Image (cartoon, grey):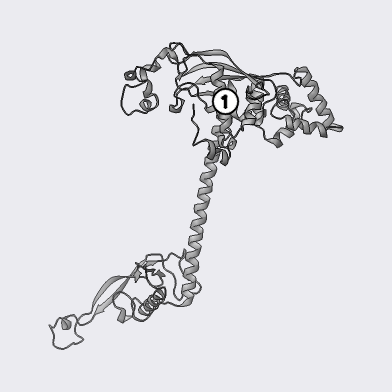
């Protein structure tokens, strides 16, 4: 009904006199030597008939727990036992320890305990303080570990971003930097447009990037800014932006060209009618952009307005053009020799469809991993936010060709690798609706 657990001494964190305790607190776990003296050794052994004072006393030294220790006696209520039983057990234990004591020589005054309310209060307060201190130190340790992890992650991202910017031109680098700014940071950049770079203003490359952003993904911001810029400093900034826009020849109906340098991470099986020749096609890229656009929650009407459509009475032209300006080149020359014929290796699972025993693999009909190509996206009008997200995800974690569901044809681009959280582009409804039901390729 009730389990009596082993008792243990409580460390009060101090020694000596403690207010409220009857005795001084010794060092935790300290043993002291006590002595008991036998005055009639031979009499008790029945070697003498009468106990006389002629025998030599024999002192016996023995260890004892020093008085003043505060002990805790845990009690645990077993299952299917009524709660009042624990009160009964506590009363019995209290009576036994204070009236009868525990251990040897209790009849001579050893092993007795004081169970007063004062001692209970002091011990409970100390235990609670110890627990709170432990929890506080544990929380501080977790916070410190979290800060270290966040700092390491911040350094890693910064290094990755610097590596991603290393191979870009000045304007491409500026476009990436401006694209990473949140709304408040971008607004501050625009308001500092006319300031000297040494005084917090943007550089010439950043000014051009700001103008391109205002003609593209930040078009709504520009419309709102123009309405406010009727006089004063804002009007001066708006005029400077218009002059630079005119100098850059970014007319309202001017096309915007964006170049993506891609690299294939895995072999891409994309041969056409001629199975011995791999070919990177703009139509395949558009097909993947269609799929990612729908995954991100794009509706049919949105898809038609952006990608174009020949259905219905009012056909629509696409708002952007995809061009492969440089076919893939370079890459590993002997990559196909690494595909096992059989076994349990992960490569067998991913590319087993093309292993030698199936006879389906034609190395000449695949783009080798490590190959690099160049793709241009030409916008007839500024891209919408959903199209921007589609391009960023496809050129970061997309794939092309046959067996993309088995990691074939995986590609990436430094331009699109902006280190944003991919899940920010999705909403819960979109994930429930598309991810479980749609094929990848």
Residue at 50% in and 68% down: 125
The quarter holding residue 433 reads top right
Q: Residue furthest front?
A: 313
Q: Secondary structure at mark 1?
A: helix
* Direction from residue 56 to residue 283 in the image, left or right: right
Q: Position of residue 420 (x, y in %)?
A: 58, 33
Residue 353 versus residue 28 in the image, above or below = above
The quarter holding residue 251 reads top right
* Direction from residue 105 to residue 165 in the image, left or right: right
Q: Position of residue 353 (x, y in %)?
A: 37, 23
Near-viewer residue (421 or 367): 367
Q: Position of residue 252 (x, y in %)?
A: 76, 21
* Direction from residue 317 to residue 244 in the image, left or right: right
Residue 215 versus residue 296 in the image, above or below = above
Question: How many marks on residues?
Answer: 1
Q: Position of residue 127 (x, y in %)?
A: 47, 65
Q: Residues within 10 Å of mark 1 (few under 14, many from 20)?
A: many
Q: Residue furthest right?
A: 231
> Which quadrant of the rendered structure holds the N terminus?
bottom left
Near-viewer residue (238 or 426): 426
Residue at numbered disc 1: 289
Residue at 40% in and 69% down: 72
């Amino acid at each position: 009904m009730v389990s009596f657990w082993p008792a243990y001494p409580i460390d009060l964190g101090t020694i000596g006199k403690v207010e409220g305790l009857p005795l001084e607190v010794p060092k935790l776990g300290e043993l002291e030597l006590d002595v008991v003296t036998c005055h009639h050794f031979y009499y008790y052994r029945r070697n003498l008939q009468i106990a006389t004072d002629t025998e030599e006393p024999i002192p016996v030294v023995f260890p004892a727990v020093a008085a003043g220790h505060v002990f805790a006696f845990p009690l645990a209520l077993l299952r299917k036992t009524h709660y009042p039983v624990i009160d009964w057990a506590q009363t019995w234990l209290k009576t036994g320890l204070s009236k009868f004591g525990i251990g040897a020589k209790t009849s001579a005054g050893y092993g007795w305990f004081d169970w007063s309310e004062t001692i209970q209060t002091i011990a409970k307060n100390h235990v609670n303080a110890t627990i709170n201190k432990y929890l506080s130190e544990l929380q501080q340790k977790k916070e410190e570990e979290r800060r270290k992890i966040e700092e390491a992650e911040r350094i890693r991202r910064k290094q990755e971003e610097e590596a991603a910017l290393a191979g870009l031109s000045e304007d491409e680098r500026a476009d990436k930097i401006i694209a990473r700014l949140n709304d408040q940071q971008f607004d501050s950049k625009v308001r500092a447009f006319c300031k000297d770079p040494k005084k917090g203003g943007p550089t010439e490359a950043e000014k051009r990037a700001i103008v391109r952003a205002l003609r593209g993904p930040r078009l709504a911001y520009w419309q709102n800014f123009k309405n406010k810029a009727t006089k004063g400093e804002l009007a001066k900034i708006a005029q400077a932006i218009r002059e630079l826009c005119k100098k850059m020849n970014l007319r309202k109906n001017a096309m915007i060209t964006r170049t993506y340098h891609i690299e294939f991470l895995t072999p891409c099986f994309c041969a056409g009618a001629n199975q011995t020749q791999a070919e990177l096609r703009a139509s395949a890229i558009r097909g993947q952009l269609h799929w990612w656009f729908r995954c991100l929650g794009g509706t049919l009407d949105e898809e038609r307005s952006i990608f174009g459509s020949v259905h219905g009475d009012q056909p629509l032209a696409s708002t952007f053009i995809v061009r492969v300006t440089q076919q893939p080149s370079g890459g590993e020359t002997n990559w196909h020799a690494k595909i096992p014929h059989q076994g349990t290796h992960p490569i067998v699972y991913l590319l087993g469809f093309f292993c030698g025993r199936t006879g389906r693999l034609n190395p000449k009909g695949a783009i080798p991993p490590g190959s690099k190509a160049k793709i241009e996206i030409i916008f007839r009008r500024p891209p919408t936010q959903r199209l921007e997200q589609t391009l960023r995800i496809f050129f970061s974690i997309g794939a092309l060709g046959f067996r993309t569901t088995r990691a074939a044809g995986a590609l990436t681009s430094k331009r699109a690798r902006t280190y944003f959280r991919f899940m920010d582009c999705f909403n819960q409804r979109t994930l429930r609706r598309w991810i479980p039901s749609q094929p990848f390729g």
